[in-house]
Image (cartoon, rainbow, N blue to C red):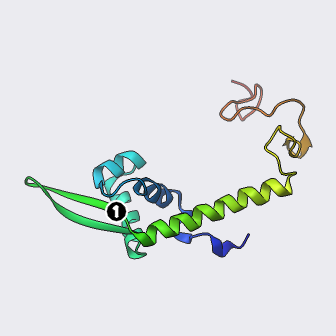
Amino acid sequence: MDPADFDTALLDPTRLSIVSLLVSVEWAEFGWVRETVGMSPSALSKQVSTLETRGYVEVKKGYVGKRPRTWLALTPTGRAALERHVAALHRVVEESQRAGGGGAPGRGGAAHTIGGAPSRGRPSRPGRRCQGSGPAGGR
């Protein structure tokens, strides 16, 4: 995998979240984007400025009644960058699957390992902690 396949601006999870959200709408109100991605107004503004500088996001300012509003839209350049970045991520997954035996975990692919040794049985489910593990030594 060539690192040049990835878009450096979209390697940041916050910016990736913003453009991924905007891909499904024509225009989005700044406040809705802020709430959806869970950011402060200043943090979102900084990330939007970075995306706007790269030509990925268009920003329009206006009023609803007497209240100022800001709207965001993904540009065709931003959409293309997102599509290339997602395609590169898919290639990583495909190459990893081929290197590991080509299958999904538990379905003929490589054996599951924990700490370098094959595990017995099914892998633990995401989000579940094994009893007796972790710094607290248990629950």
Where's residue 14, x and y in %?
48, 57
Closer to the camera in the image, 52 or 131: 52
Q: Quadrant of the C terminus?
A: top right
Horizontal side of 28 relative to 78 (left or right) equals: left
The kind of secondary structure element at disc 1 is: strand
Q: Residue at x 65, y 33 (%)?
A: 127
Classify residue 108 by image quadrant: top right
Above-or-below relation of 51 to 115? below
Classify residue 118 by image quadrant: top right
Count of numbered circles on the image: 1
Q: Quadrant of the N terminus?
A: bottom right
Where's residue 49, x and y in %?
36, 69
Q: Residue at x 41, y 64 (%)?
A: 47
Q: Residue at x 37, y 71 (%)?
A: 52
Horizontal side of 99 relative to 77 (left or right) equals: right
Horizontal side of 87 relative to 26 (left or right) equals: right
What residue is shown with label 1?
73
Closer to the camera in the image, 52 or 79: 79
Where's residue 99, x and y in %?
85, 57
How dense is the environment of label 1, judged by Cα within 10 Å: few (below 14), some, or many (20 and up)? many
Can I make out residue 76 in this image? yes
Q: Residue at x 21, y 64 (%)?
A: 61
Can I make out residue 38 in this image? no
Q: The disc labelled 1 sits on which kind of residue?
A: Ala
Above-or-below relation of 87 to 113? below
Above-or-below relation of 118 to 6? above
Closer to the camera in the image, 11 or 78: 78
